[in-house]
Amino acid sequence: MSSAENYFITTPIFYVNDVPHIGHGYTEVATDVLARWNRQNGKNTWLLTGTDEHGQKILRTSIANSVSPKEWADKLVAEAWKPLLETITIQNDDFIRTTDERHETAVQKFLQKLKDDGFIYSGEYEGYYCVGCEEYKQPGDLLEGGEDFPGDKVCAIHTRPVEILKESNYFFRMSDFQQKLLDLYESRPEFIQPESVRNEIISFVKRGLDDLSISRASFDWGVKIPWDDSHVVYVWFDALLNYITATGWGSNEAEFAQRWPAIHIVGKDIARFHAVIWPAMLMAAGLEPPKRVFGHGWLLVGGEKMSKSKLTGIAPHEITDVFGSDAFRYYFMSAINFGQDGSFSWEDLAARYQAELANGFGNLASRVIAMVSRYCNDVVPAATEMNDADAVIVDTVTNAFGNANAAIDRLAIHDAISAVWTIVDALNLYITEQEPWVLAKDEANRDRLNTVLYTAVEGLRAIAVGLSPVMPLATAKLWDALGLAEALGGIADQHLSRAGQWGITPDGLRVSALDALFPRIEE
Ligand code: MSP
């Protein structure tokens, strides 16, 4: 087993009641960029994603579609959720489904352990439940139904009536963990991020924790409670366990010891499950809490959280079919500060595609390669004497990677991209000012022309590496066109922590023609 540092990062597992929209794609891409960055830096990286398939929401959807819940889940996983990963170029290491045997067996084992250790008892639950959220609700979480649902209480998120439950359930002694959770938040301030989510969770836990109902007896689509098969496990209790059942807990302790704990990337709507219920479950089982829970913001459409149930959902392929997967990834990662909400609009996407990708980066790449072809017969020249203008580029590259690597460590993906983008801007300015096409007119300028073109190619090398976790397809094309693959190996093997060094590109490389990286989009 390698001694490299471990980097285990997860997405939420997605409900299969419906097909993915760009909000789901957003979480996947952010997690994938962080994973690629760290993988490329030589860490022993593991990206886990998957699907959440039990519970009433999926059961009801399957009934409405006249198939069994398992048939429904199989269909959605095969036709929608796994294809999503290809659509947006996700390089996951595993895909867990909560209907996998490996998962169900380990969930039962976990429950039995908590029961044996005295953390589970049977009791009566009486209260509200939102099937859309798959969550028990407090009266304070609800709104009045108003004109649409007179007399009913509705969920503030789904604006649909909640159900009133009265059931005998098994309960998890979550209230035992209130102080331990507060101590965890206090001693590890980075545990919940960003700060806004951390503050909200701390005040929630300070208000007091109830024990949690962890079983349901009124339907049977779920993992059976091992000592009482008239109950199934509450879907969130089942789902949260995916992070450890997929990495060997209960079946392969060596793997589990190596991978755990994880960094969880989730939407802020579900940060509470991950930062309260989940660490309490782990503590009860004597396991380490996660390394971090990062609650990112929402994609808004017309000012509202994008959602299928409100018909504001846009499918990821609607964007990638037109702009490509790299543009999808770049747009959402650069236009929105990771951790804050961001509004999606087609106009903004199209404008940034044209200005930043086609004109800013794509043109730069094509022009530099075309000049090396034309003025140097396809061969990257050696630099000779360097002047102040060249030194600006060298410094820009060094600083960019210092800043970008630091940004990724604090999960600030947008800052990492802006840091790399300083090279794009500096190099565009450099070429405008150095005017290689003027230098090329007089053979007396040959040394200067060579230095300018080498500097431009070396700058492009740095840009390609720096953007490769975000835009793996375009940067690999550029890498090949620059002839770097033969000299330095694949782009995915270039360490970002070392990419800021100057002079990595050897002279004498043979470049080849590059089709537009970001072609013009017809209206
Ligand atoms: N199944 C649960 C998660 C269980 S994890 C143990 C679930 N699934 S979900 O399919 O409803 O949504 C999962 C995630 O999708 C959200 O946490 C969030 O990461 C992402 N998003 C859903 N809508 C979104 C937006 N409008 N904007 C950004 N992300 C969104 O919750």
Image (tube, grey):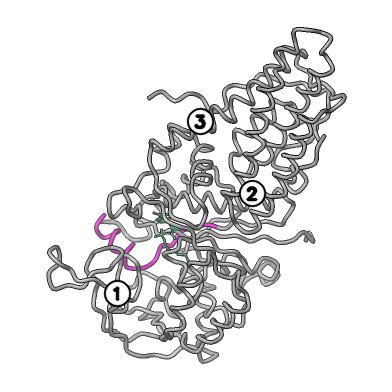
Vertical position of residue 397 compared to residue 512: above or below: below
447 or 241: which is nearer to us? 447
- The answer for how far apart the CA atoms under marks 3 and 2 are is 26 Å
Residue 454 at x, y = what percent? 78, 25
Residue ID at (57%, 30%)? 360
Q: Are marks 3 and 2 in contact (CB under 8 Å)?
A: no
Q: Residue furthest right?
A: 385
Amino acid, disc 2: Arg
Residue lying at 50% horizontally and 43% vertically, measured from the top left: 88
Q: Marks 3 and 2: which is nearer the front? A: 3
Q: Nearer the viewer, residue 264 or 301?
A: 301
Left or right: where 522 falls relative to 419: left
Quarter that holds the C terminus? top left
State which tag comes first along the sequence, 3 or 1: 1
Q: Earlier in the sequence, mark 1 or mark 2?
A: 2
Q: Residues within 10 Å of mark 2 (few under 14, many from 20)?
A: many
**Disc 3 designates what residue?**
355
* Crowdedness near tag 1: few (<14), some (14–19) or many (≥20) residues, C-alpha within 10 Å: some
Q: Is residue 282 above or below residue 123?
A: above
- On the question of residue 178 being in view, the answer is yes
Q: Secondary structure at mark 2?
A: helix
Instruction: Depth check: give the residue in front, 520 or 488.
Output: 520
Q: Is residue 496 left or right of residue 187?
A: right
Q: Position of residue 471 (x, y in %)?
A: 59, 39
What residue is pinned by disc 2?
Answer: 36
Judging by the rendered image, the residue that carries numbered circle 1 is 129
Magenta span covers which residues?
A: 49-65
- Distance from label 3 to label 1 (Cα)? 47 Å
Give amino acid for label 1.
Tyr
Please say if 103 is above or below 286.
above
Magenta-colored stretch includes residue 341: no
Give the SS element for disc 3. Answer: helix
